[in-house]
Every structure is written in C-alpha cells, then in structure tokens.
Image: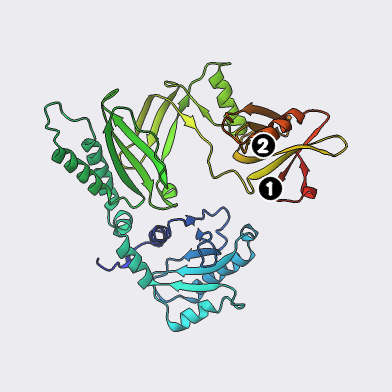
Amino acid sequence: MTRIAWERYEGNDIEAVVAMLINREHPNSVRITPSRGDGGVDILDRGAAADGGDVVYQVKRYTKPLSANQQDRVEESWSRLQSDPRWEALNVEEWHLVTPWDPTPEAESWLRGLDDGGSHTVVWHGLTYIDALAAKYPEVIDCYLEGGKSRIEEAYQVVVALLAPYEANEALDVPTVSSRLAKALTVLEGDPHYKYELRMGDGQLPGAVDRPNLMMTWIHSDGPGKSWQAVDVIARCAASATERPIIVSGTVTAERDSDLAAAVQDFVDFGTPFVTPRGAFAGSIDAPGGLGGPLKDAAMQVVSLGDDVGADPDLILESYTPEGEVIASTEVTRIERSEGSKGIRVVLRQRNNVFTVEDRYAPSEGGKRQFRFGDYSNQPALGVRDALAFISSAASPNTVRVRRKGAPVKSLEVV
C-alpha cells in the first residue's frame, strides 16, 4: 500500500480517518460525542487495559513537530480528563495520544511527563502506528480519502441486482448460484463499517440469528414455500452504527381506543415494547448495502435491549407482616427496564418462571404493579412453593420488600 501523505488532508478528515482506524483495531471502543468539550476523551475503550481498567485515546491532526500552542492543547486534553466530573467513574489505566507524526525522544519525554504521579500508562502513537493500521484496514482509507464511498454505493446496487428474482428462463445450476453469491460477497468487502453474510434456502422463512453485532437482516422470498435469500448486516465495530447508522422512519396507524393505540401510548409513556399487525406501519429504511428502501404494508416490533437491565439484576422479594416478620421469599431476576415520557418500567421474573411482575412508576400518578403467571411445569417443587407462598402473602396489610441477592437483610428497601 502506498504511504499516505497525511499533510495533504484537512484536519477534520485526518481525525475522522484515524478515529475509524482505531475503532476497527479495537472493535469495542466508542466515539465520544462532545456536549461541551470531550473532556480529554475522543475514543473510550472500557475495560480494555491489561488489568481491566479503561483505555482512552485522544486523536490530534498534527502532521509535523508540535508547536508550543499545540502542546498546550494536548496538555489541556490531559488536564480535562483528570478534572472533568463527567469522567469521575472511569478507571483510566492508559491514555494514548494519536497523531500522524512520529515523536522525537524529547517530544515523547514531554508527553510522559504529563503524568507526574506515574499512575497511568501514557503512550504516543505516531505515524508508524497509523500507517500500520491503514495497511491493515485499506477499506477505511479507500472510503474516507480516496473516493471509495461512491464506489461502494455503486457496488450496493450491483448486489441488489444479484439478489433480485432470477429470470424464469435462466439456468439455476449450482455453479451459477455460487458465482452470484461469491461476487456479491466480493463487492461488499470494501465497506469499512459493515460486513455481510448471505444465507439461502427454501420453504419457511428464516428467523433471526444469534450473531454478535448483528444490526439487521434483509430477507427476500419468491413466495410462500419458495426459495429465499437472507443478508445479515454485521457491524465491524461499535462505532459503525454511529458512522453509518441504520435509520427507520415512518408512521404507525392505529384506530382511536384500539389495543394498538393503547400499546403505542404505553411505549411513549413507559418505553413498553409492542408489536403492530401487518399493514399498520409504512415508511422507509436507510440501510447500508443497498438494502434500504420503502416499507409498505409492513409490521413493526419494538423490543427491549437485553443488556439494559441495570446493575445487580438478581434480587430477592420478601413479604413481611405488619410486625416485621418474614412470611415468604423468592428469587427474581430483572429482565427488562425501560423509560418513557411519563415514568419508568421494570419487569422481574421469578427464578422458576412461576410469575412475572411488572412495575410502573410515574411521579404524577404513583406506582402500578401487575402479576402474570408463567409455565412452571417441571420446575423444582420447593421453588414453586416459595413463589406461590410469596404471591399469596403479597397483599395488605403485609409489606413487600426487595433486596440484592447476597446483600444483608438490613439493606432492605420498601418498593
């Protein structure tokens, strides 16, 4: 790969490309969007240090020896990281300055001197480091600096044509199909943000796959019971969704006072998941790989994020008499948590699936609790007995309390 003349590019372009290269090298790292300055953090990779600490990258556009003013800016970034209250919870083990210029021994010594106490690992990643990443991820350079973005857009259209319904008189032998799929995969390898995996079959349409970083699945079918093709769109790194987001826009149509209207209102008020029937949603999707377009006669499903359940999801529910004696207890897990314009919603599921309890809290209206029984057949009898005993005792004048699993009883808090 030809060495990149970084000095020819505008500063914002340099920072965008270098940041993407770091994101690709460290897929779990995320960009920090400044609200009032970045606080000395351009890219954050939580838990990536050798002992589990956080790693911070500060990207600068400097392509030549740093001037006194530029050194001041680096020092300001370092100072903001130490003092900005927004980063108090970070456990920063490593701080990396990244610039397309290799430091002199004097410059590197100056940078290391910023950490007087020696409690952080301070590293200067210069031109050699960035060029190595550029050689490793050439698609990033091609897309951001060398006009590759337009070529990728053209390739998207080629892929759509390749996945279009075949002509009736076209020979569909195995070599022909294999050639189509191989070509489709090849033209999409230049996408720096996403990769694409193709599946094919016939009969019943495929369901969602359990795939890390899966952002969407596009499915085309020739009709009920006929052949289908599926394309799984997978983010190459955590920053992909920020750099090239998948955006769905449209309108849900619901009749006044219908169940759907109530479900949509619950979503607005408390973030409650819901599903629309087919035909209730119309709009469009802006997606990579040429897989977007209008959405007609569609259905929509809003789901809860499985990883957004808060800290300490394993809890114990206990019922108490008015005198403070324990009547019954059972183990539960927080499986959903959401928030809307009116308040918050929390869903707990009993360990043996005996029941699910959904709590909603609105400052203006107070709390509301709903129990639903589950299928607890073939579950341990003692666990089921304890859960049923808890439900039967969870009524006035008794009190229901919750505590973290393993926490001492004195930490009880009234729900």
Q: Secondary structure at mark 2?
A: helix
The dot on residue 394 is none
Q: CA distance from mark 1 to mark 2?
A: 18 Å
Tell me which residue sits at (85%, 39%) in the image.
324
Inspect the image, locate mark 1, and give the three-letter code of the amino acid beneath it: Lys
In the picture, measured across the screen, residue 217 lies left or right of residue 164, that is right
Q: Residue 72: give x, y in percent of width and height.
A: 54, 72
Quarter containing the C terminus: top right
Q: Residue 282 appears in which quarter of the rendering?
A: top left
Tell me which residue sits at (51%, 66%) in the image.
49
- Residue of label 1: 405
The tally of labels here is 2
Q: Residue 144: give x, y in percent of width and height.
A: 33, 55
Depth check, front residue: 376 or 114: 376
Quarter containing the N terminus: bottom left
Compared to 105, does 183 lie above or below?
A: above
Depth check, front residue: 325 or 239: 325
- Residue of label 2: 382
Can residue 409 be spotted in the picture? Answer: yes
Q: Residue furthest bottom?
A: 106
Compared to 403, does 99 lie above or below?
A: below
Q: Secondary structure at mark 1?
A: loop
Q: Residue 56: give x, y in percent of width and height.
A: 52, 64
Inspect the image, locate mark 2, and give the three-letter code of the amino acid beneath it: Leu
In the picture, measured across the screen, residue 351 lies left or right of residue 319, that is left
Q: Residue 219 appears in which quarter of the rendering?
A: top left
Compared to 142, does 288 lie above or below?
A: above
Q: Residue furthest right?
A: 323
Tell me which residue sits at (36%, 43%) in the image.
233
Asked which colour scheme the image uses, the reply is rainbow
Q: Earlier in the sequence, mark 1 or mark 2?
A: 2
Callout 1 environment at 10 Å: few (<14), some (14 to 19), or many (20+)?
Answer: some
